Image (cartoon, rainbow, N blue to C red):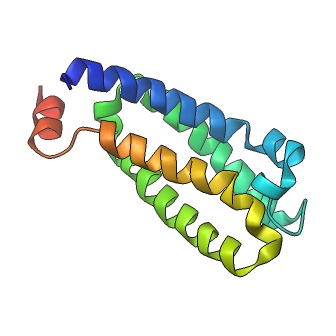
Amino acid sequence: MLMATRLHWLRITLVACGVLCLVLLPLTHLWPAGWSWYPRGSHSEHMIVIFYAVLGIFLIRAARDPMQNLSLIWFMVWSSIVHGGIMAVQSLVYPQHRGHLLGDVPVLLIAAVVLALLTPRGKIATASINQ
């Protein structure tokens, strides 16, 4: 894939991930089984929703110049893999959390994979940054 095409799709993906992070609060109300944490309305749930809202704003901003925001993008990739992985295991262990296997778990893992595939790395990334 050409670098310009790759960056175009990376920008779109960053905006989409950012918007998804920003709409997390409404998703927790629309489909609690797939998007909410227990206990509902707890301080920890509020903290994670706010964390993702801030992350969403920065992902949208990163879409302007992804090459200057590679560490933020890779943070999103790796934190999504770890978060989604832990939630997947917890969803399998605790039946009351199985809805996450159809909600936030696949979204986190798909976002991580797509961002990882689109984000330039190695010599390509270094050359783009140094230009």
Q: Nearer the viewer, residue 63 or 92?
A: 92
- The quadrant of the rendering that contains the C terminus is top left
Going 53% across and 67% down the picture, which residue do you hit? 85
Q: Which percent across, then down, holds residue 101?
A: 67, 60
- The quadrant of the rendering that contains the N terminus is top left
Q: Nearer the viewer, residue 67 or 6?
A: 6
The picture quadrant where one finds residue 30 is top right
For residue 43, above or below residue 46: below
Going 30% across and 25% down the picture, which residue do you hit? 7
For residue 61, above or below residue 37: above
Horizontally, is 18 left or right of 93 in the view?
Answer: left
Going 90% across and 62% down the picture, which residue do you hit? 40
Q: Which percent across, then down, holds residue 9?
A: 38, 24
For residue 104, above or below residue 82: above
For residue 44, above or below residue 80: below
Q: Which percent across, then down, holds residue 75?
A: 42, 53
Horizontally, is 76 left or right of 97 in the view?
Answer: left
Q: Which percent across, then down, holds residue 12?
A: 46, 24
How many dots with numbers?
0
The picture quadrant where one finds residue 6 is top left
